[in-house]
Structures are given as structure tokens and as C-alpha cells.
Amino acid sequence: MSLAPWIEKERLEAGCDEAGRGCLAGPVTAASVILSPNLALELVNDGVLDDSKKLNKKVRDALREKIESEALAWAVCHISPQEIDRINILQASLKAMREATKQLRTFPEFMLIDGNRFVTEKGLPPHECFVKGDGRFASIAAASVLAKTHRDERMLALHEQHPQYGWETNAGYPTKGHRAAIAQLGITNHHRKSFRQLPGLMSRMDAS
């Protein structure tokens, strides 16, 4: 099924998506993107844009460059592990989408939200939620690409500080290698303490 370029062509629609909800470490990251009708059509007709999880790194990076240089507006927001622990991962994900949208240099008239729920706040435009929206609408797919690539970039930088956890490849997700590193070393200040890591490990803290 090909992506829809928009819901209403003449309306400024911002697609919103997040990356990193299921990770044990690192931020949850959201992006908000407004595509022009011409760019949306081009991306749809090219057939390359899709849910970022279905794309390889080379394609994601090329799409990121095009989206960031040609979109009407885009913004990315990272929510820290500490904030995730304080308000929970769902609320942190929704906050990241709200904050990314508020940072757009052109304010949208409507928001397309990936997922089945959203908590809005005063000053934000109307919205609609779409389950698996990153595979349905160009603007949400574009947001998924930016959220994924920006978060991966952040995790690569954190990997330089803590190379033992393999974040350059696992991006903080609960892989076997990541869990083994936690079992051996404990956790860092980049881990989400409210997440169930491994039994008995939460009292151990690696030097940050």
C-alpha cells in the first residue's frame, strides 16, 4: 500500500512520530514534519519513503537530508531518561511529539499522530491518531525517518562514552548483548531506571 501524501492538500499538516520507546537506554525522540504538497507527492511517487524501521541506514540518511533541506518545516525533540523515569515512557513519547511540533518554524493547522493515543495541550492544533501511521501517510513516515536518524546519531555519540554496551549497533534496545553488558557492568545514567532491566540490577550503578 502506497503512502497517502496528505489528508487535505491545502492544509498545513504536521506528521509526528517517535523512536526509542522500547529501549533500555537513551532518550525517546520525536519529530514533527510539514511537507509541501509537491515534496509529499515526490516522496510518494519515488516509492522510497516508508516507515523508517523498514528502511536501511543508507536510505534513511538520504531521506533525512532531503527532508531537512526541502520540507516546509521540521523539528526534533529528545526526552531524557530521567524525564522518562519521572513521567513514564508513554507520557514522555507524547511530550516529545508536542514539543517537536511547538518548535516548528511554520505552525501547522493539523497534526497527524502515529499511534492510537495523544494528549494535546492548549495552543496546539487539532489532531488525529493513526495506528501504523508511518506506513500510511508521507508526513508521518518523514517524521519517523528524522526521529530514527536523530536518535541513532545521539546513541552513537553516547556509545563513545560507554562502548561496552554496544549502543552503536543496538541503539539502546534490549538485545542479548546489551543485557549481558548490564549484567556484568550495571547501568549508566543513560539507562532508564524505571524499566525492568534484569533482576537485581537496579541497585548497581556504573560510573557516568
Image: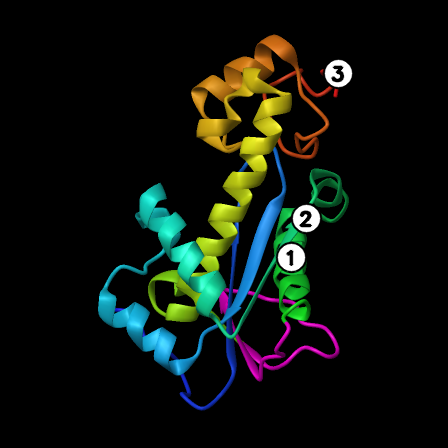
Is 109 part of what is drawn in magenta?
Answer: yes
- The mark nearer the N terminus, 2 or 1, is 2
Is 92 part of what is drawn in magenta?
Answer: no
Q: Residue 93 placed where, x, y %?
A: 61, 54
The residue indicated by pointer 1 is 96
Look at 64% across and 73% down and name the residue there: 105
- The mark nearer the N terminus, 1 or 3, is 1
Q: Label the magenta part by its dominant secondary structure.
A: loop
Name the foreground residue: 146 vs 20: 146
Look at 45% across and 56% down and name the residue there: 144
Look at 61% across and 30% down and name the residue there: 158
Q: Which numbered circle lies on residue 207?
A: 3
The residue indicated by pointer 2 is 79
Residue 156 placement, left or right of 96: left
Q: Seen from this angle, which residue lies furthest top? A: 184
Quadrant of the image for the N terminus? Answer: bottom left
Going by the numbered disc 1, the residue's amino acid type is Ala
Quadrant of res 2: bottom left
